[in-house]
Image (cartoon, grey):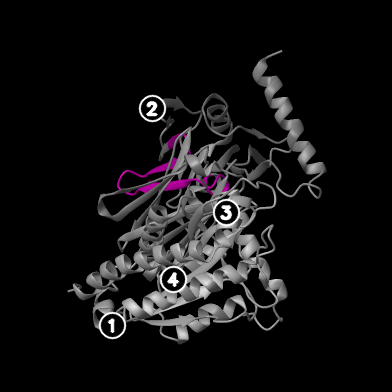
């Protein structure tokens, strides 16, 4: 028996199965297109076929030609012509293509033959000869949604499978084009290109190859920074674009005197009914952070001539949301949240690290944030916290993006200065979603000065002299940061 005939029988059986169980299947793997009887010959509408397959079409008015752009191929129809071009190959058809001034019609049997011998979706004519049945498009990138935010935009790509973020690449080219290349991606180009555009995106174009999908966005504004992540259910790839930082330069210039670093807010982590981490000696995190905060504040007041605000200066409980509220209402220019780390499993873990408010990229970082955020359970239900998904953390960082670069610099100099004084390992600058940093309208970081779960480090942190070293290092970092921060503001033209 002919192999192609066997294939068509199998395909027909799958079509019949779908029709029998249509109510049970949410997304049938085949689609039907009506046949048009023209002079006793069954024809297919080219535009209906294109819409069914979600492929882009291009009409050449002067030449009466219609081009259908499939992901891996293209088909060119010419009015009143008995030949069809697929890719670089010419195929003869039984009857000329009919053009009625609006649509192109191609003989169904000829189209069936072309589909079955080319790299295009397979199809059959059903037994009633009323429909042309064709395999449904197998797209995994379906549409795009653009959302404008205060300091940037979100690009949401709706997807139906997970992708390896490490293989996704973003590139920039002339004319303001930003391209995202997704290996194994299959684009519903009509769904993408017909999406509603929002500033700063003025144009979208797609390019499909057998190995990857590329979607290009033309932007009206310079992109200062971007991040890519995928929702946990793999339904979206989200690209955040941070823009307009340069456009805010004039505003910064007007407000430069207001933003000179004249107030530093120090936030001793935990307090009151919330002890934080507890060391094997029984010492509490809340005690260590308050002592470091006061030692640091004393040096700042004495030597920098800068106002110091504490979110707490005694052993009291302060909700997380109220800490940044205190910082903002006091006119703070820097927000430092001081904490001590702990781990339940790895007792050998030790060292210091400084965190920025961004989605956590490591299990350790996510674990630290979850522990620090758990204090919410001790609060009275007077404040509603945002569910801290990666997306919501990104939105929070975008709202604070005016000071993102300053926060990064502050974190780096803190790590550098701590490294000069302490013998514990430098664990580097990290990122995670800390509620205590959300809403701080100023450069802000969270410092983990050591591990109470480590016996050696717990003993050190229990000593006033060691805590003084930590305060000294952070103080030196603030001097370095202040010099660079203020020189940037004062030199703004």
The residue where tag 4 is placed is 400
Tell whether label 2 touches label 1 (CB within 8 Å). no
Mark 4 lies on a secondary structure that is loop
Image quadrant occupied by the N terminus: top right
- Residue 88 occupies quadrant: top left
| Residue drawn at (57%, 27%) of the image | 116
The residue where tag 1 is placed is 255
Q: Earlier in the sequence, mark 3 or mark 1?
A: 1
| Depth check, front residue: 197 or 146 | 146
| Depth check, front residue: 126 or 149 | 149
The residue where tag 2 is placed is 88
- Residue 3 occupies quadrant: top right
Q: CA distance from mark 3 to mark 4?
A: 34 Å
Q: Earlier in the sequence, mark 1 or mark 2?
A: 2
Q: CA distance from mark 1 to mark 2?
A: 62 Å
Confirm whether residue 83 shows in the render.
yes
Q: CA distance from mark 1 to mark 4?
A: 17 Å
């Amino acid at each position: 028996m002919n192999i192609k005939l066997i294939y068509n029988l199998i395909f027909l059986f799958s079509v019949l199965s779908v029709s029998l169980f249509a109510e049970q299947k949410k997304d049938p793997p085949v689609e039907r297109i009506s046949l048009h009887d023209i002079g006793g010959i069954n024809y297919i509408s080219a535009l209906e076929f294109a819409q069914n397959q979600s492929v882009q079409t291009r009409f050449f008015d002067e030449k009466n030609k219609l081009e259908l752009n499939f992901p891996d191929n293209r088909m060119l129809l010419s009015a009143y012509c008995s030949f069809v071009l697929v890719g670089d190959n010419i195929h003869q058809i039984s009857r000329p293509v009919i053009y009625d001034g609006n649509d192109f019609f191609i003989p169904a049997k000829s189209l069936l033959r072309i589909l079955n011998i080319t790299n295009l979706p397979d199809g059959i004519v059903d037994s009633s000869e009323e429909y042309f049945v064709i395999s449904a498009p197998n797209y995994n990138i379906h549409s795009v949604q653009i959302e404008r935010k205060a300091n940037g935009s979100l690009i949401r790509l709706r997807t139906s499978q997970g992708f390896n973020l490490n293989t996704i690449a973003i590139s920039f080219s002339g004319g303001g084009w930003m391209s995202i290349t997704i290996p194994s991606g299959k684009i519903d180009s009509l769904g993408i290109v017909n999406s509603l555009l929002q500033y700063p995106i003025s144009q979208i174009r797609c390019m499909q190859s057998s190995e990857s999908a590329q979607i290009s966005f033309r932007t009206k504004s310079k992109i200062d920074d971007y991040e890519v992540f995928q929702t946990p259910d793999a339904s979206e790839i989200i690209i955040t674009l941070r823009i307009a930082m340069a456009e805010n330069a004039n505003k910064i210039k007007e407000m430069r005197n207001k933003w000179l670093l004249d107030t530093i807010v120090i936030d001793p982590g935990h307090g009151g009914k919330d002890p934080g981490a507890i060391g094997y000696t029984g010492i509490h995190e809340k005690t260590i952070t308050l002592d470091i905060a006061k030692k640091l504040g004393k040096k700042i007041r004495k030597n920098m001539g800068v106002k110091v605000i504490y979110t707490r200066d005694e052993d009291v409980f302060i909700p997380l949301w109220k800490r940044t509220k205190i910082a903002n209402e006091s006119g703070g220019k820097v927000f430092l949240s001081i904490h001590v780390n702990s781990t339940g499993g790895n007792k050998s873990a030790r060292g210091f690290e400084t965190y920025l408010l961004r989605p956590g990229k490591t299990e350790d970082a996510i674990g630290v944030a979850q522990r620090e955020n758990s204090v919410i359970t001790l609060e009275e239900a007077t404040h509603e916290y945002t569910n801290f998904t990666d997306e919501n953390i990104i939105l929070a960082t975008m709202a604070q993006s005016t000071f993102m670069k300053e926060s990064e610099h502050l974190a780096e100099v803190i790590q550098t200065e701590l490294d000069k004084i302490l013998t514990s390992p430098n664990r580097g600058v990290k990122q995670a979603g800390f509620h205590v940093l959300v809403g701080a309208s100023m450069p802000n970081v969270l410092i983990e000065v050591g591990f109470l779960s480590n016996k050696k480090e717990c003993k050190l942190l229990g000593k006033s002299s060691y805590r003084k070293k930590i305060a000294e290092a952070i103080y030196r970092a603030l001097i370095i940061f202040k010099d660079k921060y203020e020189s940037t503001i004062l030199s703004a033209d």
